[in-house]
Amino acid sequence: MTTLAKNLRPLDPHGSQPLYLQLQRALREAIEQRLIAPEDALPAERELAADLAVSRMTVRKALDGLVEEGLLVRRQGSGNFVSTRVEKNFAKLTSFSEDMRARGRMPRSVWLKRSAGTVSPEEALTLRLSPGTPIYRFHRIRFADDAPMALEYATVLASALPSVDAVDSSLYEALERTGHRPVRALQRLRAVLLSDEQAELLEASAGDAGLLVERVGFLQDGTAVEYSQSYYCGDTYDFVAELSAST
């Protein structure tokens, strides 16, 4: 029996949940717990099926689901591997820290700037604020494990946080503690070329392809509470959105 199969959560053939979903959950947990690391190859479908006493169809359906989630990547002729890229659901309002933890990665930040001030003309226009409104600015490099993933420049209403030092790791967790976490957001994604400074901070090359995500987050009452600009390396992030035809 493979080491992975030995460490997976046991499957219950008499449970209410289909076996392929049970296996999908067990594999997802194994990735989150770092039992299998990015770029690790999974055992062959035949081996997993034999070790777990399930059909190959069950294994294939479980793996298909994880490939669709972006947790696994399927390489023709080589098998299934834990993805090193991060797939971000563009339609789901989550924080960077939440996204990384869901993929078994450890989020951390290196602060570039934390400061209190008042809105700039651009920020006032974007957040629909009066000139002179107090805000906090948070500029940092976001890491997954030891890999730099993004540069984040966030502006937040000062009234939404007790102080500029209230944000330790996750901005959204800090806002949630005060009851000011955004419940909806408008996001814009566009391709950019990384500047010399951005490339150096992201350990990339100047002129490399990048992605810029601009987000304005709103509270339940429609108040804009957050404006952020996040720069990602183009070779580490995939943004996806589920679309449906109108009827």
Image (cartoon, rainbow, N blue to C red):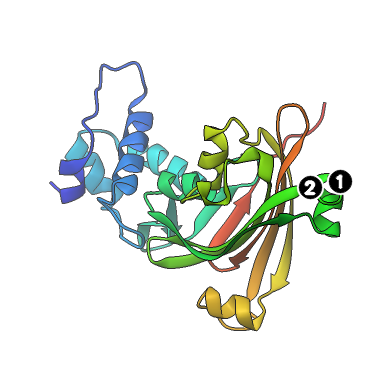
Mark 1 touching mark 2, by CB under 8 A? yes
The correct choice, above or below, for 78 with respect to 18 in the image is below
Question: Which residue is located at x 70 percent, y 32 percent?
Answer: 219
Dot 2, how many residues are within 10 Å of its Cα: few (below 14), some (14-19), or many (20+)? some
Report x, y in % for residue 23: 32, 35
Q: Which mark is residue 130?
A: 1
Question: Which residue is located at x 29 percent, y 17 percent?
Answer: 15
Can residue 118 be spotted in the picture? yes
Disc 1 element: loop
Residue 83 as seen in the image, left or right of residue 132 = left
Report x, y in % for residue 232: 60, 64
Residue 166 as seen in the image, left or right of residue 232 = left
Using the image as rendered, state which of residue 6 and residue 119 is in the foreground: 119
Report x, y in % for residue 41: 30, 59
Quarter the C terminus occupies: top right
The picture quadrant where one finds residue 94 is top right
Q: Which mark is residue 45?
A: none
The amino acid at mark 2 is Thr
Residue 120 as seen in the image, left or right of residue 176 = right
Q: CA distance from mark 1 to mark 2?
A: 6 Å
Q: Which mark is residue 133?
A: 2
